[in-house]
């Protein structure tokens, strides 16, 4: 690897680690820089849908093996707040057709999976990005502690508040969604929660999800319409959250009350306007730094991993690194924009609080033919590697 080109990766979240895995497989040396003093994971649970694992496998031959770290989705239900079953979604059918599972997992276990796939790597902690400068044949990065490093390309995988994006001068405006999200992990058992079980309950301006992530752990989340400023200032406990869902199925209040107060995270729901460009010269953006999205499709992690797979694909043996980064952007932007917009649109529908729109929403889900549901899901869950190779 002594003659290998070097990628400087800012951020060690899902996008940064996935990028390191992909580029290392493609023959690159990787150096990762993290502003925090440790790789300690914040956050609770998430989903890595089948398209992400399929992208890594089909483009780079990488088997992430996420089913060993989380729980593959075997049964996915959408229910009314009364408990009435509206639809079972064909996740297993799509996974079998693609040859990759959709997996629900904790952030900590996903980090472990990516680190296990990465193996030995140069990861420097406590390195807060300050600026970069392009040089003939490369790029030099400066950190707030005064240190500098040089490499062949720079990848900004530093999340929603990306400092690399700011340094590039790429405009991306915060877009508030108008609701709060509560997130938690808890050891919990209930007859309804079978292996690989996911249920989403829809109500009046509020929702709840309960998800098996394996090894006795369950991830749950809840939403409720609320101005973002109020959501950012929210301070409450599990009883306050449970009261929001009073009258919902017993399991909802029970799992919330079974969760320690300090295990419940609250965040305001928001994304950003889609940037016109991700790439300038030898610098590019990836994951939430490029296209943060609302959570309704569960594709935030999956899109970051897809980005990494495509970046690894275009940079493998690429003689012109800047041209390869432009190709990466050209391939990824249309699909990422589609998923970002679809997530935002679904979020609005799911958070309806007026009676007639809610009735239409629920009836539409209840009456939709299985084929229609499969076609809708396939837009996000299927990764088209042939289309990527053709570009």
Image (cartoon, rainbow, N blue to C red):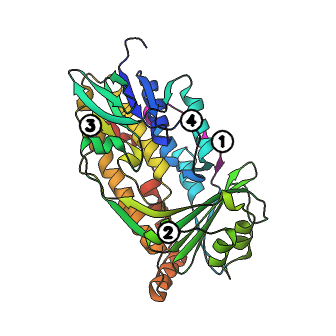
The residue at 62%/69% (across/down) is 236
Q: Nearer the viewer, residue 173 or 79?
A: 173
Residue 288 lies left or right of residue 204; in this view the side is left
Q: Nearer the viewer, residue 7 or 23?
A: 7
Mark 2 or mark 4, earlier in chain: 4
CA neighbours of label 1 inside 10 A, class few (<14), some (14 to 19), many (20+):
many
The Cα–Cα distance between marks 4 and 1, rounded to whole angstroms, is 21 Å
Secondary element type, mark 3: helix
Mark 3 or mark 2, earlier in chain: 2
The residue at 62%/77% (across/down) is 244
Residue 387: image location, x then y, percent: 33, 43
Viewer can see residue 142:
yes
Secondary element type, mark 2: helix
Residue 239 in the image: above or below residue 142: below
The residue indicated by pointer 1 is 69
CA neighbours of label 3 inside 10 A, class few (<14), some (14 to 19), many (20+):
some
Residue situated furthest bottom in the rendering: 356
The residue indicated by pointer 2 is 231
The Cα–Cα distance between marks 2 and 4, rounded to whole angstroms, is 28 Å
The residue indicated by pointer 3 is 327
The residue indicated by pointer 4 is 38
The Cα–Cα distance between marks 3 and 4, rounded to whole angstroms, is 34 Å
* Residue 33 falls inside the magenta stretch: no
Magenta-drawn segment: 58-73
- Judged by depth in the image, the label closer to the viewer, 1 or 2, is 2
Disc 1 to disc 2: CB gap under 8 Å: no
- Judged by depth in the image, the label closer to the viewer, 3 or 4, is 4
The Cα–Cα distance between marks 1 and 2, rounded to whole angstroms, is 32 Å
Secondary element type, mark 4: loop
CA neighbours of label 2 inside 10 A, class few (<14), some (14 to 19), many (20+):
some
Viewer can see residue 245:
no
């Amino acid at each position: 690897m002594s003659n290998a080109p070097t990628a400087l990766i800012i951020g060690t979240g899902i996008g940064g680690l996935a990028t390191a895995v992909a580029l290392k497989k493609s023959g690159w040396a990787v150096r990762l820089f993290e502003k925090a003093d440790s790789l300690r994971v914040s956050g609770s649970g998430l989903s890595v849908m089948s398209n992400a694992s399929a992208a890594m496998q089909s483009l780079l031959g990488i088997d992430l093996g996420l089913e060993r770290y989380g729980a593959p989705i075997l049964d996915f239900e959408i229910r009314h707040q009364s408990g009435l079953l509206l639809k079972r979604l064909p996740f297993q059918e799509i996974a079998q057709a693609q040859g990759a599972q959709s997996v629900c997992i904790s952030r900590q276990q996903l980090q472990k999976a990516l680190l296990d796939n990465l193996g030995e790597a140069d990861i420097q902690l406590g390195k807060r990005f300050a600026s970069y400068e392009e040089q003939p044949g490369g790029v030099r990065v400066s950190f707030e502690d005064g240190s500098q490093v040089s490499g062949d390309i720079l990848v900004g995988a530093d999340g929603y508040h990306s400092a690399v994006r700011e340094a590039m001068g790429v405009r991306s405006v915060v877009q508030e969604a108008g609701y709060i999200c509560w997130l938690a992990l808890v050891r919990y058992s209930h007859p309804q929660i079978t292996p690989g079980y996911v249920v989403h309950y829809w109500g009046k301006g509020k929702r709840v999800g309960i998800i098996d992530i394996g090894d006795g752990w369950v991830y749950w989340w809840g939403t409720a319409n609320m101005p973002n400023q109020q959501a950012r200032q929210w301070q409450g406990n599990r009883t306050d959250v449970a009261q929001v869902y009073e009258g919902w199925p017993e399991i909802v209040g029970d799992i919330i009350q079974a969760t320690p107060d300090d295990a419940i995270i609250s965040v305001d729901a928001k994304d950003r306007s889609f940037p016109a460009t991700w790439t300038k010269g030898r610098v590019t953006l990836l994951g939430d730094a490029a296209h943060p999205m609302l959570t309704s499709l569960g594709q935030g992690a999956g899109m970051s991993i897809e980005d990494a797979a495509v970046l690894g694909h275009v940079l493998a043996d690429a003689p012109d690194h800047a041209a390869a980064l432009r190709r990466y952007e050209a391939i990824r932007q249309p699909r990422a924009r589609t998923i970002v917009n679809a997530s935002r649109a679904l979020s609005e529908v799911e958070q309806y609080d007026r009676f007639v729109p809610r009735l239409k929403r629920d009836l539409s889900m209840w009456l939709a033919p299985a084929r229609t549901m499969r076609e809708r899901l396939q837009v996000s869950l299927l990764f088209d590697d042939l289309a990527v190779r053709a570009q």
